[in-house]
Image (tube, coloured by chain):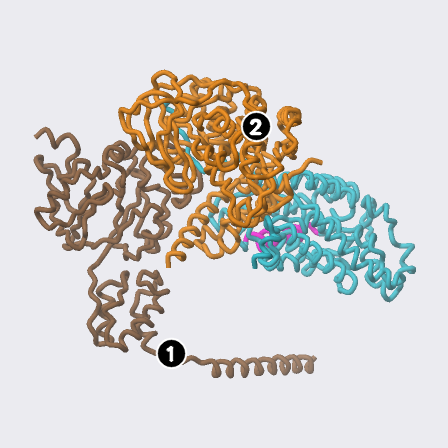
């Protein structure tokens, strides 16, 4: 027997899964959202998406090849996912050069500055978006109306209720879209955040594929509904109801795609619950009392910063945990 | 809803291609090499020397210490020499080399296949007999069986758990024993039940063996103490703590033995061996070995005499496939890749698995993406990614604090990791280092 | 506009002065009087914080030195990377006798290269000796041999080690080696030993390049340059300085006794003894140690 055998430690078999497969699966899950955004906002949505993805991939290639002088790993698809998510979080009317800058900031500062994939504390797409909201405030809030391609703009549902505490909800009732429109996406807003239906189709696919934890979206939306619900029960005339908050703005895409980002969320199940509840509550607080109408991205970014603390304090449940406590 | 253990676990493809192959006896080899240390604990002391004539079933090595096991000759013939032989990990161990001459069995051994049902011995004599027969756990760890039945002061066991899970992919040896030797095995379980002094015995079998579950449920109707528990398929259900949790709902605390929660666990193969020894006087000299692999011509389950070389087993299954990259002693999740095929089958060798070259190489290791998969599949509730990190940075105290010692090296984390990180490998290093440090602390 | 600027300046200025005061008082309150000697001694040390002296970094050794100097004896302390030169300077600084310690170097006790100890399996796993060691026999059949994954090279802080791709073994660059002992700790098979560098411009030293405790026949089968414990070197040296001893099937040359005469080198039937200088073979005039077979023909 002349064949040289291979020696190695167990396990000798491995699941056929890899980082590229994970990332491409996330990209596939975003296809329904893509279709919805093109339907709602027209062909320019595709252009914004293309520029964002290209900017992210180009930045990653440039940093790895020329600054870090390391192997280029764009084929793992993580830059594409960041690009897609960034585009889904900005309005369709934004000048394309701003999109490119946003992609550069997302990857260059949000990801590569920390050492690349797996090392970034903050969700890169949200870093890009946060940068853009503060730098390009006007174009970032220039919301095109859905299914109207003539360039006319209007406020998003969240924008409408931003001053509801003063004006009262009843005054706004006629302007607000119905829940059905909000569910299918027939409203103004960022590219990908309008259609709850499309987001959930992709999200359910990711849960089935075992790539995201169902607890994250559930607890995120649940806690958002809870905090907004409390104020709605106290003063229904001044505050919007919880279902409105769940469907409006970036809550849906944030809960399903941003808060579930692997790198920037906690490792243990319990940690992810704490993370999701925290992000949901912060989003609610920012929406109710903050200067910005939308609070999802800041809610998640703040919780991103707390992930190391969550990871070191909220440990997974050990086997025979009860007996462990008895001993001590 | 069938039972299983509650946390972690993976579902690797079970690939039980040898399952339909009935147990066939492997032809006697020309020479056997019987290692004196086939079990956990002190190796046996040889009591034969070169030139001695031995019969099959004759004692050739005596226990040396509390945790140790007798070694018997598996063939009749002449002792050639007592020399080193490599174990599956490559380390040399003392072994008795015997040239086979005929097949003559030592006196008093009943080789007939008639079922002997009535159990005449009492508790102490059963344990004594198990010890004399050199019986060890046949699931892989090879812990001397009699030691498990010496119940420590103050503990009152109430359940015997029999492991028919065989959660390792590819392996089918236990499955075949349950199908073909159900009656003998059930008597063996009764014997073990008496030896432990308990009323209840539970056989845990995974759902991927419906024929075995059905067969055993039928055959065990005569035994009121024995129940068959069908378990949801999930690896590593065959691990002692996970199996007890699945069958009885009890949790064995960290660093404790099953007796802590009133249980003892034995493999179905062990129960069969106990039957052979107690009822038929035949010590543990042969076992069922699965020889399998996707490219193996005839995936088989052989009844093999201990000491037969791996090469002989592979030859009988159609020879080593051209494209073989790894030959594994045991299953693919926890087995050991062997370097040398002349090494002998031991009491704990449950299978010989040949993997093709393409499956023998690990994927490229990339950066951890913090997906948390390793944490969610760990059946012990550990954080493999963190222990790996600590082990790479020589931070042994932190690794110990994160319960690295609870790891049983089941390999779920390495199996699931999309970045292909060598998690178990580094946890093993950490465990070794923590053990060294504990010993050093104790010595102070 | 002016008032805005002024208020800002006042507020910020006020905050700055408050913090400055706090810092000043805290620094005063918690000031620790440090012996100026410690800083001076530390500046004389190499400043690489290798830990070879047994103290946590150079500052630790400097503190210990100052303390020892108070008791007028620093002979118990030594900085291996700094060597005699550094210790001499420090001794002069204190006006005391320096610790004398001969120069040492890390030496690899294995010569199981690809050619000498053919690889029987391919190793598949992380590139780490610590992990590969868990495998047991691993790459070659010898369970004592170098695993070739380079943990020692990673551990070395002084670029004194590199892996030779043609032999699969690490090579020590004597001039860079500070004998800090990092490789000794890193090697899971304990193949490195800190030995005396040896005398001479090109230091002369002799050592057994094998760490196998296998019996002769097994060792020989696994590796052509293994020590087979035949005892010839021991007998040879017994007539000279008695520096070689045999334990667990492995010969060992005590560097403190060895005079580096090189007489044992050609005696070894497998060539397991290496020397830093050319040694004449027993009969022929080749510079290489004689190998098996040639010996009995004469």
Colour displayed for chain C in the image of the structure: brown
Q: Give the range drawn in magenta.
A: A95-112
Q: Is residue B289 visible?
A: no
Colour displayed for chain B in the image of the structure: orange
Judging by the rendered image, the residue that carries numbered circle 1 is C34
Q: Residue C215 occupies which quadrant of the picture? A: top left
Magenta stretch: includes residue B55? no
In this rendering, which labeled residue sits more in front, label 1 or label 2?
A: 2
**Residue C136: x and y, percent?**
38, 39
User: Considering the numbered disc 2 on the image, is that residue within a helix, a strand or a loop?
Assistant: helix
**Residue B440: x and y, percent?**
38, 55
**Residue B327: x and y, percent?**
44, 28
**Which of the image's four quarters has the C terminus of chain A?**
bottom right
Count of marks, rendered view:
2
Dot 1 and dot 2 within a common chain:
no
Colour displayed for chain A in the image of the structure: cyan
């Amino acid at each position: 027997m002349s064949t040289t055998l291979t020696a190695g430690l167990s396990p000798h078999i491995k699941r056929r899964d890899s980082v590229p497969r994970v990332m491409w699966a996330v990209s596939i899950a975003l296809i329904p959202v893509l279709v919805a955004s093109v339907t709602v906002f027209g062909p320019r949505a595709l252009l914004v998406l293309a520029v964002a993805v290209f900017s992210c991939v180009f930045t990653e290639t440039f940093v790895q090849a020329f600054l870090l002088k390391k192997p280029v790993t764009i084929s793992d698809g993580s830059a594409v996912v960041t690009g897609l998510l960034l585009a889904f979080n900005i309005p369709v009317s934004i000048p394309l050069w701003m999109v490119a800058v946003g992609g550069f900031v997302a990857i260059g500062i949000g990801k590569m500055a920390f050492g690349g994939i797996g090392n970034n504390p903050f969700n890169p797409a949200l870093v890009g978006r946060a940068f853009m909201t503060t730098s390009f405030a006007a174009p970032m809030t220039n919301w095109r109306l859905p299914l109207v391609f003539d360039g006319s703009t209007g406020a998003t549902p969240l924008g409408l209720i931003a001053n509801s505490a003063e004006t009262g909800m009843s005054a706004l009732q006629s302007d607000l879209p119905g829940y059905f429109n909000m569910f299918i996406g027939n409203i103004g807003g960022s590219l990908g955040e309008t259609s709850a239906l499309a987001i959930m189709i992709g999200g359910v696919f990711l849960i089935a594929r075992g790539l995201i934890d169902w607890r994250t979206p559930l607890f995120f939306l649940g806690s958002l509904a809870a905090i907004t619900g409390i104020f709605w029960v106290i003063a229904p005339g001044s505050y919007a109801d919880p279902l409105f908050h769940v469907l409006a703005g970036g809550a849906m895409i944030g809960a399903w795609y941003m808060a579930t980002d692997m790198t920037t969320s906690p490792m243990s199940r319990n940690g992810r619950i704490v993370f999701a509840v925290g992000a949901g509550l912060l989003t609610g607080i920012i929406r109710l009392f903050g200067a910005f109408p939308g609070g999802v991205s800041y809610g998640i970014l703040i919780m991103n910063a707390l992930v190391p603390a969550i990871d070191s304090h909220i440990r997974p449940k050990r086997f025979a945990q009860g007996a462990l406590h008895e001993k001590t | 809803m069938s039972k299983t253990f509650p946390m972690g676990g993976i579902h690797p493809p079970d690939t039980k291609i040898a399952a339909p192959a009935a147990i066939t006896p492997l032809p006697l080899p020309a020479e056997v090499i019987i290692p004196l240390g086939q079990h956990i604990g002190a190796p046996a002391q040889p009591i034969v020397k070169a030139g001695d004539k031995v019969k099959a079933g004759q004692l050739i090595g005596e226990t040396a210490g509390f945790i140790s096991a007798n070694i018997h000759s598996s063939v009749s013939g002449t002792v050639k020499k007592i020399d080193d032989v490599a174990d599956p990990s490559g380390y040399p161990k003392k072994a008795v080399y015997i040239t086979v001459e005929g097949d003559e069995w030592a006196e008093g051994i009943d080789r007939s296949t008639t079922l002997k049902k009535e159990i005449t011995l009492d508790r102490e004599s059963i344990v004594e007999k198990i010890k004399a027969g050199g019986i060890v756990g046949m699931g892989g760890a090879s812990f001397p069986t009699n030691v498990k039945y010496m119940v420590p002061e103050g503990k009152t066991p109430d359940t015997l758990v029999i492991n028919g899970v065989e959660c390792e992919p590819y392996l089918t040896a236990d499955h075949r024993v349950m199908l073909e030797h159900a009656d003998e095995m059930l008597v063996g379980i009764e014997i073990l039940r008496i030896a432990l002094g308990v009323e209840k015995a539970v056989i845990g079998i995974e759902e991927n063996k419906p024929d075995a579950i059905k067969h055993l449920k039928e055959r065990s109707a005569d035994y009121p103490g024995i129940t068959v528990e069908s378990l949801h398929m999930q690896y590593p259900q065959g691990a002692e703590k996970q199996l007890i949790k699945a069958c009885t709902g009890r949790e064995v605390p960290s660093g404790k033995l099953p007796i802590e929660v009133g249980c003892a666990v034995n493999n179905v193969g062990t129960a069969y061996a106990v039957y052979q020894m107690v009822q038929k006087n035949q010590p543990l000299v042969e076992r069922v070995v699965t020889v399998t692999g996707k490219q193996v011509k005839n995936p088989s389950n052989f009844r093999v005499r201990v000491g037969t070389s791996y090469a002989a087993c592979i030859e009988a299954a159609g020879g080593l496939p051209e494209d073989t990259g790894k030959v594994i002693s045991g299953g693919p999740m926890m087995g050991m890749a062997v370097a040398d095929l002349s090494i002998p089958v031991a009491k704990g060798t449950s299978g010989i698995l040949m993997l093709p070259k393409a499956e023998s190489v690990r994927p490229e290791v990339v950066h951890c993406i913090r997906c948390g998969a390793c944490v969610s599949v760990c059946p012990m509730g550990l954080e493999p990614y963190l222990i790996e990190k600590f082990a790479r940075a020589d931070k042994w105290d932190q690794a110990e604090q994160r319960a690295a010692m609870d790891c049983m090296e089941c390999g779920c984390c390495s199996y699931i990791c999309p970045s292909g990180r060598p998690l178990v490998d580094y946890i093993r290093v950490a465990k070794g280092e923590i053990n060294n440090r504990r010993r050093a602390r104790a010595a102070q | 506009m002016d008032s805005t600027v002024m208020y800002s300046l006042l507020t910020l200025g006020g905050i700055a002065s408050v913090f400055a005061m706090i810092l000043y008082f805290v620094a005063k309150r918690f000031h620790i009087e440090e012996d100026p000697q410690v800083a001076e001694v530390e500046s004389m040390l190499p400043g690489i914080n290798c830990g070879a002296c047994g103290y946590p970094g150079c500052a630790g050794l400097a503190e210990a030195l100052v303390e020892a100097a108070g008791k007028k004896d620093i002979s118990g302390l030594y900085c291996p990377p700094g060597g005699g030169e550094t210790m001499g300077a420090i001794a002069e600084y204190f006006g005391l006798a320096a610790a004398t310690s001969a120069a040492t170097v890390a030496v690899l006790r294995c010569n199981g290269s690809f050619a000498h100890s053919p690889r029987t399996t391919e190793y598949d796993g992380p590139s780490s000796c610590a992990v590969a060691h868990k495998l047991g026999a691993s790459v070659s059949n010898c369970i004592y041999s170098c695993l070739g994954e380079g943990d020692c090279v990673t551990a070395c802080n002084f670029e004194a080690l590199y892996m030779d791709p043609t032999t699969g073994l690490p090579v020590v660059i004597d001039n860079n080696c500070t004998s800090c002992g990092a490789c000794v700790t890193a090697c899971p098979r304990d193949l490195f030993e800190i030995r005396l560098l040896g005398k001479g411009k090109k230091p002369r030293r002799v050592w057994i390049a094998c760490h196998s405790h296998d019996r002769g026949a097994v060792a020989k089968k696994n590796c052509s340059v293994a020590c087979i414990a035949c005892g010839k070197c021991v007998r040879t040296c017994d007539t000279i300085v008695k520096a070689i001893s045999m334990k667990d099937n492995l010969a060992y040359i005590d560097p403190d006794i060895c005079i580096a005469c090189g007489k044992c080198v050609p005696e070894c039937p497998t060539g397991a003894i290496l020397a830093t200088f050319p040694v004449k073979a027993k009969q022929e005039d080749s510079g290489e140690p004689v190998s098996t077979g040639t010996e009995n023909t004469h």
